[in-house]
Image (cartoon, rainbow, N blue to C red):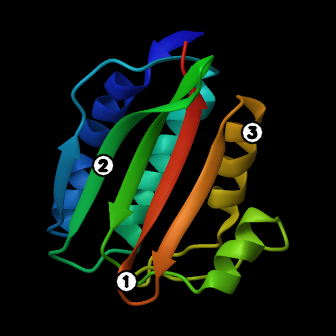
């Protein structure tokens, strides 16, 4: 199904608004143009919602979450659209990121206010993105936060 990834991001932000307000988080968004993708809309909305919920879970009360959308030229024949969800939370060690992305295992890791977390959501997100021709990458610094980047081919 063809849909606008940027529009979906705005929808997901409105869905998580209450949860972010409970934790006194500020959400900054840089979403300003259309990004059409041909993917399973339900899977991609699940991915986006999971990443945003994780950002809330692992962010310290009163901090911020940033959501950015970019279009990246891949080569002469195509481009991809990416969504970046950035938090200023607890972060992850490089070994944990590697293990998550390689399906070596999920790790129980409670949120900043003891919210439950298993890491399974990220593995599922990675798999859903791969089924739709996309990919997930993670950049993180322990104690400073994380950036979750997913990309899908544009149409």
Which residue shows up at 71% across the image and 58% down it? 123
Count numbered badges in the picture: 3
For marks 2 and 3 on the same chain, the one whose residue lies earlier in the sequence = 2
Label 3 belongs to which residue? 130
Disc 2 packing (10 Å; few <14; some 14–19; many ≥20): many
Disc 1 packing (10 Å; few <14; some 14–19; many ≥20): some
In x, y percent, where is residue 144?
35, 84
Of residues 6 and 52, the one drawn nearer to the viewer in this rendering = 6
Decide: marks 1, 3 in contact (CB < 8 A)?
A: no
Q: In this view, does 94 lie above or below 52?
A: below
In x, y percent, where is residue 2?
54, 9
Which residue shows up at 40% across the image and 20% down it? 35
Q: In which quarter of the image is residue 100?
A: bottom right
Label 1 belongs to which residue? 112
Residue extending farthest front: 76
Q: In this view, does 100 lie above or below 82?
A: below
Label 2 belongs to which residue? 67
Question: From mark 2 to mark 3, how far is it between C-alphas?
Answer: 21 Å
Question: From mark 1 to mark 2, how far is it between C-alphas?
Answer: 20 Å
Residue extending farthest bottom: 143
Which residue shows up at 50% across the image and 52% down it? 149
Q: Is mark 1 on a helix, strand or loop?
A: loop
In this picture, residue 131 sits left or right of residue 43: right
Question: From mark 1 to mark 3, how far is it between C-alphas?
Answer: 29 Å
Which residue shows up at 57% across the image and 82% down it? 109
Q: Is mark 2 on a helix, strand or loop?
A: strand
Disc 3 packing (10 Å; few <14; some 14–19; many ≥20): some
């Amino acid at each position: 199904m063809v849909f606008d990834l940027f529009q979906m991001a705005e929808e997901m932000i409105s869905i998580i608004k209450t949860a972010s307000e409970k934790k006194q988080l500020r959400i900054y968004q840089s979403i300003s143009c259309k990004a059409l993708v041909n993917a399973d809309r339900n899977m991609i909305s699940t991915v986006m919602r999971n990443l945003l919920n994780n950002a809330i879970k692992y962010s310290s009360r009163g901090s911020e979450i940033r959501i950015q959308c970019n279009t990246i030229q891949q080569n002469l024949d195509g481009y991809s659209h990416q969504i970046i969800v950035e938090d200023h939370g607890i972060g992850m060690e490089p070994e944990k990121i590697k293990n998550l992305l390689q399906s070596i295992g999920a790790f129980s890791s409670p949120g900043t206010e003891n919210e439950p977390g298993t890491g399974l959501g990220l593995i599922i997100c990675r798999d859903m993105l791969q089924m739709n021709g996309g990919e997930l990458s993670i950049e993180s610094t322990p104690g400073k936060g994380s950036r979750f980047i997913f990309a899908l081919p544009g149409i």
